Structures are given as structure tokens and as C-alpha cells.
Amino acid sequence: MILLILALCFGSLVGVTLSQNDEVDNAATMTVLKQDSGTNLSQMNMTLYSVAMDMDAFSVGEAVKFTAPNPGWKLKQVRVAGWNGFDGNATSIPESENFLLEVRDEKMNLLYRMADTQNAYFTFPAIILRAIDLPSVPVTDEFYVIFYDRGSMFIGMELENSTGSSYFYDSVYSELLPVEFTDQSNTTTSINWLIRAVGE
């Protein structure tokens, strides 16, 4: 069983503050879909997490389920709150490694996939809400955005106000798994991945 205490300890050791990315404001005319509490990120009860802390980071990703707001809606951007460990010192820039991003339909059929280096997006001395632009990806009804951090970085997770829309996705078995963390006192917490879908 995954221990929430590991993530909480890591988050307190990092001691980073949240920063909003300027790119986020460039898409003001698009609709932002959120499956977290919607609280201002700087006031959110959150910590950092990497799948590599608990399981195979190459086959398991952080998944969020969304619902297209209307027929013909196209996903044009994904926003991920993440951090690659950079503390502002040139010697702290981590080695470039890849993350993987997928968009899947409600039956888990692949609609879009891209890989890039974490340093191209998340080299900032704080956790940052980073916009990743996509070609227009038509989605209907429910769809999933899956982010495989691959141990190259950490993503934000909200520790309260679970919407029930965050999962682990095991790509080997094409299976969604619940995200529940149990601490040392046997308290179970469901969380929200800080991944958002943007489109029009």
C-alpha cells in the first residue's frame, strides 16, 4: 500500500512555493476543465509526488478523467503543476529525461501521445503550473489526460477535496487504479492530480 507520509515528508523537505506560468494567461478565451477543488493553487493543500516513489514509472501514469463540455470540443492544451528539482542554481539543473503525455477516450483508446524533456517545461525554482500546447485533439464525452512523470520530475497533488476523477493508469494492463494513500495511522486519503484540460 502506498504511504501518504512519504509524499508529505518529501513536500515539506522541498519547501518550494507555487508559481503560475505566464503561458496560462495566453489562453484566456479557452475553457479550462478542472478536476481539483479549483482553489487558488497558492492556497491549496498540496504536495509533490512522482510515481517512481511507489511503482514502475515507465508503465504507470497519473490520470485525470474529464468530460467535454459540448459536442465538437477540442483539447488544445494540458496544464500540469510540476517541478523538476531546480532550485535556481545552475548546478541543480537535473539531467534531461523524458515525460510522456497521453490523451485517451472513455474506452482508453489512444487519441494523442507526445514525449518531451522535463527540463523544457519545469525548470523553475518552484512548482509551476505549466501549459503544454497540443494540436487540436477532438474529444467527446469522457476522456482522460495521462501524465507519465517517469521519475524525471514531481507533479502536484491536492490532499483534500477529492473529486473522484484522479487515477493511476497502468498502461501494461490498460487499467485505471484508484489513487488512495494510507498514512502510518491507517488514515486513507484520496487526492486530486493537478492536471487540467484546456480547449474550445
Image: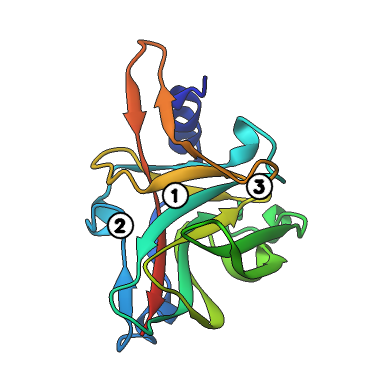
Residue depth check, mark 3 versus mark 2: number of the one nearer the observer: 3
Say which residue appears at 55% left-offset and 56% top-offset: 108
Judging by the rendered image, the residue that carries numbered circle 2 is: 41
Task: Please report contact status of discs 3 and 1: CB closer than 8 Å, yes or no.
Answer: no
C-alpha span from label 3 to label 2: 29 Å
Q: Position of residue 52 (x, y in %)?
A: 65, 37
Residue type at tag 2: Leu
Say which residue appears at 72% left-offset and 54% top-offset: 94
Residue depth check, mark 3 versus mark 1: number of the one nearer the observer: 3
Judging by the rendered image, the residue that carries numbered circle 1 is: 156
Position of 58 compared to 189: left or right? right
For residue 113, above or below residue 31? above
Element on which disc 3 rests: loop
Judging depth in this view, the residue of 53 and 64 nearest the camera is 64
Task: Please report contact status of discs 2 and 1: CB closer than 8 Å, yes or no.
Answer: yes
Judging by the rendered image, the residue that carries numbered circle 3 is: 171
Residue type at tag 1: Gly
Say which residue appears at 30% left-offset and 53% top-offset: 36
